[in-house]
Image: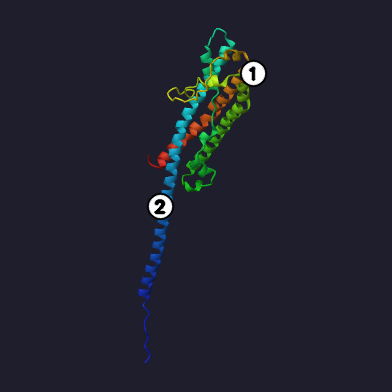
Amino acid sequence: MKIEKSIPWQRIGVEGIVIVASILFAFAIDAWWNDRQQHESEQVVLQTLLDDLRVKQVLLADMSSFSEAIIESAETLIRAASNKDQMLSEDAIDHLIGDTWWVNTPALWDSAPLSQLVVGGNLALISNVELVQELAALQVAIGRVKYHYRNDGDFHDDVMTPFMISNSNMAQINATVSHRPGQPENAFAVRDLGSNRGYRHSELLANIEFQNILVAKIERLSDILDIGHPDVEVGLEKVIEMLEVELDE
């Protein structure tokens, strides 16, 4: 006798639905986990970047006052050279020349987090398109600042240093340095080279080449303050504000 078995289509259908739902649920869990990991990674990147850019914001103010103080010292020397009524002591002249001897360092603007994102091609880690655009613009602005800093450094090494070596007592000038220009609250220790301070640098003020060197120094520092720093200042403010919103700070 042939026994016909009925196929339990309803049970098979339910089991199929359960299996498909389980697979879809597993995919959803996996996608959720990946999104969560990506979000957490993005948050770490943004926080690291924010911390670094806040330091750069303090650096910008510091380097602006630094450059302004050097310009002020150079201008004082130029005015003293052209105005015989503006008498400066030898110690004051040595100190002012010492201020103009300082130089900007491009490496101060190196930003590992920003470079890793922009130059390293990792901007895809950030989901906010507007923030990505502002970060790229900030990287360009910082590059310009570093260019102007390098100009100042090259001028210092190639022009100013050879002239000062040939025409001044560097040990005597060095002995007057007690702090970075514009920052009297931050003492700067200088090695005592035993100078007897017998060299009269007031005579150097009449040297037209020295005056031209001071003018060229002022021009390079003015490029930093008038061309380089403003774009960085605006860029830092924008990016930091956007990062704080992204991180809910």
Q: Position of residue 78 (x, y in %)?
A: 57, 15
117 w.r.t. 216: above or below: below
State the residue position of label 1.
209
For residue 242, say whether it is visible. no
Q: Secondary structure at mark 2?
A: helix
Nearer the observer: mark 1 or 2; the answer is: 1
Which residue does the image show at 44% across and 35% down from the upper left? 54
Res. 11 image quadrant: bottom left
Looking at this view, is 213 or 101 the one in front? 101
Q: Amino acid at mark 2?
A: Arg
Looking at this view, is 234 or 223 the one in front? 223
In the picture, which quadrant includes the C terminus?
A: top left
Res. 197 image quadrant: top right
In the picture, which quadrant includes the N terminus?
A: bottom left
Q: Position of residue 165 (x, y in %)?
A: 61, 22
State the residue position of label 2.
36
- Relative horizontal placement of residue 7, taking residue 164 as reference (left or right): left
Q: Which one is earlier in the sequence, the residue at label 1 or at label 2? A: 2
Looking at this view, is 155 or 67 the one in front? 155
Q: Assess disc 2: are there few (<14), some (14-19) or many (≥20) residues with their C-alpha within 10 Å of its C-alpha.
A: few
- Relative horizontal placement of residue 57, taking residue 159 as reference (left or right): left
Q: Position of residue 40 (x, y in %)?
A: 41, 49
Q: Position of residue 71 (x, y in %)?
A: 54, 21
**Number of marks in the rendered image:** 2
